[in-house]
Amino acid sequence: MKILKNRSGFSLIEILIAIGLMGALSAWMMNIFTQQTKNEKTTATNMDIDSLGQEIRNIVADGSSCEKTFKGINPNIPSAVKEIQKVLSDGTIQKRFTANEKKIGNSGVMITGYDLKTDETYLIPKGQKVGETVLIVNYDRGKMVLGAKLKTFKIPISVSVDDSGNILSCNALASTTNLASLCNALGRSVNTAGKKCNPPSVYVKGDTPIHQKQYQHCEGGMGSAEHVLDSWTADGAGTAKISWTGIANDTSVTWRVYKNNDIVATIPGSGISSDVQSRDVEVKKGDIFKHTVLLSGGVDSDCVSGGSFSVELDLLNML
């Protein structure tokens, strides 16, 4: 008679495998829980940062509150202020959003400081006393968030400054969430790719070309007519230096430079004619400059054999 062995229960190996599987499952579930917590905390902090930033913007949109907070301060300085000062309707001053004081909002974010900083878009033009700067509100989002712990909210501010360059008066510009409206208010175009306003272009004459074209043989075409050799449209205002050269061989040659429909320069010649000229010109946004040559026909295939046209600025003094 065979005696059957009792195989009820689990072997040690089976128990160890089960423990390992339970541990892996617990770790996986814990990771899912942690990720979910981070997602929720990140969403909450971002909402608080936007909400608090808009509230601060609304306060400093009022000229009295903005001046009370920033008057006498350089518009390009870190740690500009410790708090925002709101002027109430009765003239009472209310201190709001003090840096490093306490956690605020539903997510418990903390404002760690306020910086003022000009950049390529918001700046005070050289030699002028009005312009823009940016109020940067710095936040600490705390632990258990996705991405960087520190984050900022930017508020563009229109300012006027005194002879020392410190703020006299100010007010926040349009909401940063409405980029087209903001850029339009500044009289600037929208840089959609960069998600910002294009910087202002204020020209100061100099010797560095921002536009230059070297002419090929028969540039602008052949024949007895006025040929356009080059054209340039200004995207800003100020003073520019335009320079041009030209070489042609014809019975009658007339070089011309136009600003819109007005002739800036006209230089007649005959035979082998070369033209080397420059002018300082006042420029408005949208002005069109053209370099042309009027040929009578008869020699050298009735076309130019070389030359150039350039617009030159002092880039060191550009805004």
Image (cartoon, rainbow, N blue to C red):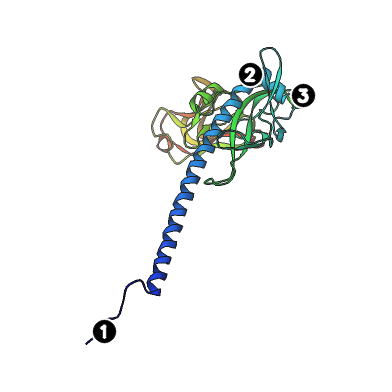
Farthest residue, direction right: 164
N-terminal of the pair, mark 1 or mark 2, is: 1
Task: Say left or right for 9 vs 64.
Answer: left
Farthest residue, direction bottom: 1
> Split into 4 quadrants, where in the image is the N terminus?
bottom left
Residue where numbered disc 3 is placed: 163
N-terminal of the pair, mark 2 or mark 3, is: 2
Closer to the eye: label 1 or 2: 1
Judge whether residue 232 can be spotted in this image. no
Q: Nearer the viewer, residue 26 or 60?
A: 26
The secondary element bearing badge 1 is classed as loop
Residue where numbered disc 1 is placed: 3
Q: Amino acid at mark 1?
A: Ile
Q: Is residue 293 above or below residue 150?
A: above
Q: Nearer the viewer, residue 222 or 86?
A: 86
Give the residue drawn at x 44%, y 41%: 217
Residue where numbered disc 2 is placed: 62
The secondary element bearing badge 3 is classed as loop
How crowded pointer 2 is (Cα within 10 Å; few <14, some 14-19, many 20+) is rated as some
Name the image quarter holding residue 88: top right
How crowded pointer 3 is (Cα within 10 Å; few <14, some 14-19, many 20+) is rated as few
Q: CA distance from mark 3 to mark 1?
A: 108 Å
Q: Position of residue 269 (x, y in %)?
A: 52, 29
N-terminal of the pair, mark 3 or mark 1, is: 1
